[in-house]
Image: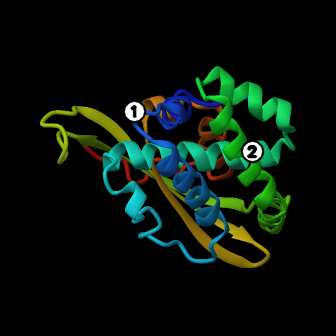
Amino acid sequence: MELSESVQRGLQSLADPSSFDRRSYQVLVDVSFRSLLSSQADPSVLDQPELKQIDQILLKQSHTAATTFILEAVKQNADKSTISSCLEELSFSADRIEIFYSTHQEHRKEVERLLASIGRCPPHIHDASWCLQYHVKNDQVDKINEPFYLISLNTEKERSSDDINFTCTVEQLQIPDVKLLVESSVLQCPGRHNKRQSE
């Protein structure tokens, strides 16, 4: 499985016993599956007693990496050896691989149904807009000095319209999936893609 650098870093943190002890690791794996399968986005999903002592940024990065890995493993119908070898490369111990795999097997069918419910035909993009912003600083760091894009895609699927909004850095914009998504929206909506360019 090919994983982005940020997902690999998040999983390596999850594999590190100094960041996640055995109990907090197990809870985070369970929470990652539950958050994918929950019908409502629950902002308090990470508010578990076993996860309170973990740095919140590290916790969120590891949670995002774990959910991404879960979806990729199910999407690719990965078997035990594929999952094990991928996690071994990221410094997971045999015990942690076994915990992950047993939880994966327990919820695999539910995640497959979830992915199948999304459908095979993605929504048709019929309008796109973007805005270039610039981060000067945030709560954790005094200076960031990083540009980022706010991208809005207006989509239509089965006669219902929906807006998809997301932000990404210049680096993330170069990831093939994001780049393809944005480029295809620009091709489908000529003349509209730069209407909100600012700053």
Residue topped by disc 1: 18
The spot of residue 24 in percent (x, y) is 47, 50
Q: Quadrant of the C terminus?
A: top left
Residue topped by disc 2: 101
Q: 33 above or below 5?
A: below
Q: Amino acid at mark 1?
A: Ser
85 vs 34, left or right, is: right
The spot of residue 23 in percent (x, y) is 50, 50
Q: CA distance from mark 2 to mark 1?
A: 21 Å
Q: 71 above or below 94?
A: below
Q: 4 above or below 195?
A: above
Which is more N-terminal, label 1 or label 2?
A: 1
> Does dot 2 land on a helix, a strand or a loop?
helix
Q: Could you say which is closer to the camera, residue 102 or residue 69?
A: 102
Q: Quadrant of the N terminus?
A: top right
Q: Could you say which is closer to the camera, residue 163 or residue 3?
A: 3
Residue at x-position 60% and y-position 36%: 179
The spot of residue 61 in percent (x, y) is 44, 43
Q: Amino acid at mark 2?
A: Tyr
The spot of residue 35 in percent (x, y) is 58, 64
